[in-house]
Amino acid sequence: MRILIADDHAIVRKGLKQILDEEPGMAIVGEAQNAQEVLDMVRRQKWDMVILDISMPGRSGLDVLSELRQNSPHLPVLILSMHPEDQFALRVLKAGAAGYMNKQSAPEELVEAIHKIHRGGRYISQSLAEKMAMGLNRNDDRPVHELLSDREYQVMQLIASGKTISEIAEILSLSVKTVSTYRARILSKMNMKNNAELTYYAVSNKLVGAQL
């Protein structure tokens, strides 16, 4: 199985390789540390799966996922992130990911997820499956943060975690003006007046946890 590991932390890539090297039939033959490397390697070579981190410098894993779905729609992507499931799992699954896992999951769970996805299935944890099933029985409106685009959601999280506009611009490799525009859109869509309201909402809804 040809697997491309995409994470900007060398230690994480090494750890994933060590886990999968112990499994028969899994040939880890590729590593990428940023969005452009992922896209270049997928264009140049054939892969059976991409294990993709959401939070990478410059273009995020969400951006990469979107482009992979357009250019390589049959390539399964397993999202592996520090973010709790409540923050990103449903969003990435709706965007076309084949699965979502938290980096704190057990190695055995990662292997199980890879096998299930390779067989053509999708992977979510048991706890997330239960939450999704419970959600089907509710008739309430969508939370307002689900109105945000992926990039707006990232900016919202960073604002709520106390980052300044300049810091967010540096983290996401965007201009200060662009981040300010995103902030204005977020406040408008969520019908809020300032960062304090935004932060209160994010904390109350457990949308702020592991940092980007």
Image: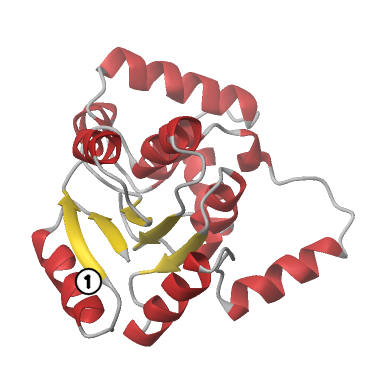
Residue visible at 29% across and 40% down in the picture:
42
Q: Residue at x 54, y 31 (%)?
A: 149
Task: Please identify the quarter of the rendering in which residue 109 is found.
Answer: bottom left
The residue where tag 1 is placed is 16
Residue 170 left/right relative to 190: left
The image quarter in which residue 1 lies: bottom left
Q: State how many labels appear.
A: 1
Left or right for 53, reference 117: left
Lateral position of residue 161 relative to residue 98, left or right: left
Mark 1: which amino acid?
Leu
Q: Position of residue 14 (x, y in %)?
A: 12, 69
Tell me the element at label 1.
helix
> Where is residue 40 shown, x and y percent of the image?
22, 34
* Disc 1 packing (10 Å; few <14; some 14–19; many ≥20): some
Q: Residue 173: which quarter of the image? A: top left
Residue 108 is situated, as x and y percent measured from the top left of the image, at 37, 86
Q: Is residue 28 visible?
A: yes
| Residue 191 versus residue 162 in the image, above or below | above
Residue shown at the point (61%, 80%) measured from the top left: 126
Q: How is the image coloured?
A: secondary structure
